[in-house]
Amino acid sequence: MQLADSYQISLVRAAREFHIPGAASEDIDRVVAGLRQTPVDTVPGLKPLRVQVLANITSDYLADHLRLMLVRAEYAPQVAPGHYGGLVRGLMGEVELTFALCDAAVLILSHRDLQFPPPVGVSAEEARELVKREVDFWAPLLTRSRVPTAILSFDQPARRVLDEQDALSPGGLGWHVKMCNLELAARLPSTMMLVDAEALQWRLGAAGWYDERLYHLCKQPYTMEALPEIAHTLVAALQGLMGRARKVLVLDLDNTLWGGVIGDDGLQGIELGMETAEGEAFAAFQSYLRSLSQRGVILAVCSKNRDEAARSPFREHSGMVLKEEHISCFVANFNDKAANLRHIAKTLNLGLDSLVFVDDNPVERALIRAELPQVLVVELPDEPAYYARAVEATKAFPLRALTKEDLGRVASYRAIAAVREATPAQGTDMEQFLIGLEPVAHVETVNRSTLDRIVQLIHKTNQFKLNLKIFEEAEIEALGPSVIALRLEDRLQDHGIVAIAVTRAEGATLRILNWVMSCRVFGRRLENVTLELMSDFARQNGCRTIEADYTRTEKNVILPPLLEELGFAADDKGGVYRVAADAPPPKAHHMKLQRKC
Amino acid sequence: MIIMSEVNHAEVMNELQNVFRTVFNNPSLVLTDETTADGVPGWDSLQQIKIILGCEKKFGVRLRARDVNGLGNVGHLVDHLVAVINKSRK
């Protein structure tokens, strides 16, 4: 293999050092030019990724910044900028977005692309009809892509001809844009994420978004300064679609969740609550964190303190918004923080690349950056009132659709940490332990209420996952009863749908197209239950063999030994694993099976 | 009141070279009066716009693309910049 030279490595390092959000500086210009000229696919640790951009603008400058943001997200990117008119060619099916061509796609919509803008003076009824025609015109684009795709929604026009009514009343162009975006969002398939251009405009401001001169010069409507933020948001959306959203916020305590040092200042001395401006800012930050926790972001604490002192504000301070119940893993000791972050990842059964680290101390941040480059470190400002802004700006937690599992996730991880701490290492105690959890596996059917979660779990799983194949909602629906989805419940909690096998009967063979299981339920033998159900299904459909298509990735290396333990045998190349449909069952799983009537 | 002194050809040429070095990510790029787009790899219409924007930022002036695009070589660009900068300082 070709080795990366020092120039390529320095380029990647420079790309990583930009703190987001940052305006386009001269340094950014130098790095994006470097990444345009020099591929970095030989730099260790970067995953190759081919991205196709489709747009009706000149997207070369945007492509420059997409490369930069992709390198920051640990990819070795190959970005093909779309050419003027590319969007329409995509719509007509002249450019096919398949894995043969690219691994991901970015589609850029703009209000200039609108086909049915309302003429001044149309009635409300006509305005609604135009929205319908507009969305019908663009909707085919939503079905064109087979690869993870981020779409930038229509942006608000630079000029508001109908003044304040432009976006508020039917007949305004702004209103037309808004309604079309909402309608496209409602029709979005699960392989796509709509990036809210109106929210981007709101963040950057009108003067930060449009540069009319640049549009007339070279058909790029955006200011150069807007490009890093646009590219960063699009890449975050792609990461969400590719299962690379982060999961955990690891929080320092002193001067991060409250002002002052609990060990020195004591309960009465720390600043927190409505008495002072600073105290109020810390409370507001905690409220933001609590909201994130409610939507499924796991919170953990990593503090250099005695455990008892660290917990005392959570238990006794009236200004605390966060309580111990919001924290899935609480670590307070005097070990170095790199070791503690490793411990937290292990306790939650997640990779270090799932962690986001929040600490006011620049020395700790530098340590984690150096020791654990997989962890995303938030560059906190000095002013606590801006902490929440800094966390949000990382875009570490992209969300395509909020599911029931997102809402229950925090409880679930708290239970994992509890189970981990109580789990005996192995042996006969293990059997007693599993039985003691009183587990029930619910067999779920494919329907409106489960579809979102099924598609999402296949997307998001990395470790227990046979291959990279993902499915759209329609495909899952079509496969219907040959999709096995299991919800795990035990005496501690309901984990939701956590295991899925997508199968298809092909003559005497039941083929497993993909099989995933959430890492939250590893060690619970749910894979044994899944196999049992597959065997039943195979025999009912006259299949004698079950075949699994395994493609090795960086993260699913745990599978081969697990499959072998389940009774599968690999073919010569290790790509196909087979087991007889009437093979004796592997280890007892101790689960009660519950089917919906 | 601060009176800014006039700039000369050599000073502007030196700064312009830094703009080019950033845009083309080439720290050893050397400009002469006779340099043209053909002599700099990657100098296309898109990079031309980056050069214009880079000059505007560096020298604190507004340039008109039409004026710049008609210039034959780097020496003429420098002359144009000197004129625009000194006019803005009067």
Image (tube, grey):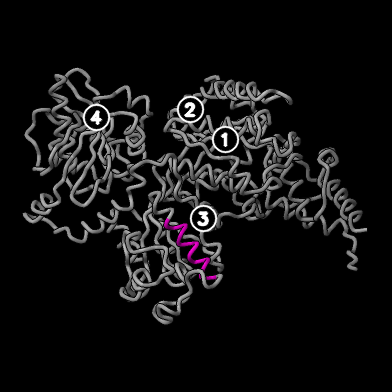
The answer to whether the residue labelled 3 contacts the one labelled 4, judged by CB atoms less than 8 Å apart, is no
Three-letter amino acid code at the position of disc 4: Ile
Q: Which circle, 3 or 4, is nearer the viewer?
A: 4
Image quadrant occupied by the N terminus of chain A: top left
Q: Which residue is mark 4?
A: A512
Circle 4 chain: A
Q: Secondary structure at mark 4?
A: strand
What element does badge 2 sit on? loop
Q: Nearer the viewer, residue A479 or A593?
A: A593
The dominant secondary structure in magenta is helix
Residue A455, image x, y percentages? 35, 34
- Tell me the subunit letter for badge 1: A
Q: Earlier in the sequence, mark 3 or mark 2?
A: 3
Whether labels 3 and 2 share one chain: yes
- Image coordinates of residue B16 in percent, x first then y, are 77, 53
Q: According to the image, label 2 marks what residue?
A: A97
Considering the image in quadrants, where does the C terminus of chain A appear?
A: top left
Total of numbered circles in the picture? Answer: 4
**Mark 3 — residue?**
A16
Q: Amino acid at mark 3?
A: Arg
Q: Amino acid at mark 2?
A: Leu
Residue A363 horizontal side relative to residue B7, left or right: left
Q: Please give the chain letter of the residue carrying mark 3.
A: A
Q: Earlier in the sequence, mark 3 or mark 1?
A: 3
Q: Which residue is mark 1?
A: A153
Q: Farthest residue toward the top? A: A507
Q: Which residues are magenta?
A: A278-290
**What is the secondary structure assignment of the residue under circle 1?**
loop
Q: Sequence order check: which comes first, mark 1 or mark 4? A: 1
